[in-house]
Image (cartoon, rainbow, N blue to C red):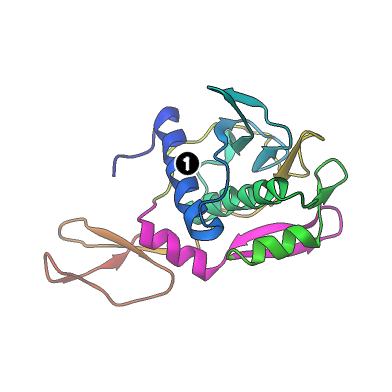
């Protein structure tokens, strides 16, 4: 796969991920939003409550992934995207999953998210919002062959801490850049694979044992 080092390619990549996650976790029933990449200094992403975009004859929600957060491991980017998709599902089905201007995530959000391979933890300020990928979601990412996004907006003062405004719900999860998967590379030909645990694996092209990438 070509590296995602252009905003246009990255947006298309996120759209591809959205469609696969939509089929996997929502039976393809989610209305496709306009996916944007903008700075969100208080969140990893958001979904607008209102349909903020017009495309052709229809109006669409905006699903944004923070431009300053794109270089996180792909499993964390996927968890952010899926988090916002859960909000979109609840919006479509009339389920109120947030309060306090979109900052506080309630048990309706938690239940819908955990049913879709997200690990959700509680914080007294933002509720059931702290989001991590489960091993099952990581397995799906590996099956899809998704890889890290090789671009990021430099935002020196970026600190996620709360949802944007009352017009959007967002993810507020200050997680370190640690990966839940391991990348193995063939020292001979450079073929690579990902795994969710330590494994012994051979490159079938070269017959060499693959090693963990540093």
- Left or right side of 172 for 210: left
Image quarter of the N terminus: top left
Residue 164 image point, x, y percent: 76, 36
Q: Which residues are magenta?
A: 118-146
Residue 41 image point, x, y percent: 69, 35
Residue 144 versus residue 1 in the image, above or below: below
Image quarter of the C terminus: bottom left
Residue 98 image point, x, y percent: 81, 49
Find the residue positioned furthest to the bottom.
200
Residue 65 versus residue 124 in the image, above or below: above
Tell whether position 127 is magenta: yes
- Left or right side of 148 for 1: left
**Observer-nearest residue: 6 or 8?**
8
Q: Quadrant of residue 156?
A: top right
Label count reads: 1
- Left or right side of 139 for 97: right
What residue does disc 1 label?
A: 14
Tell whether position 145 is magenta: yes
């Amino acid at each position: 796969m070509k590296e995602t080092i252009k905003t246009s390619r990255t947006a298309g990549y996120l759209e591809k991920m959205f469609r696969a996650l939509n089929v996997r976790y929502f039976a393809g029933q989610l209305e496709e939003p306009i996916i944007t990449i903008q700075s969100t200094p208080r969140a990893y992403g958001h979904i607008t409550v209102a349909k903020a975009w017009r495309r052709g004859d229809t109006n669409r929600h905006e699903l944004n992934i923070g431009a300053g957060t794109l270089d996180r491991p792909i499993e964390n980017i996927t968890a952010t995207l899926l988090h916002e998709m859960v909000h979109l599902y609840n919006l479509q089905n009339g389920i109120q999953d947030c309060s306090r201007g979109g900052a506080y995530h309630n048990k309706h959000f938690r239940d819908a998210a955990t049913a879709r391979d997200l690990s959700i933890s509680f914080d007294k300020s933002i509720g059931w919002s702290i989001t991590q990928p489960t091993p099952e979601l990581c397995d799906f990412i590996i099956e899809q062959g998704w890889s890290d996004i090789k671009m990021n907006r430099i935002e020196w003062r970026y600190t996620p801490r709360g949802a944007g405004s009352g017009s959007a719900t967002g993810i507020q999860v200050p997680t370190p850049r640690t990966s839940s998967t391991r990348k193995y590379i063939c020292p001979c030909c450079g073929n690579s694979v990902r795994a969710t645990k330590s494994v012994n694996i051979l490159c079938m092209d070269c017959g060499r044992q693959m090693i963990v990438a540093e």
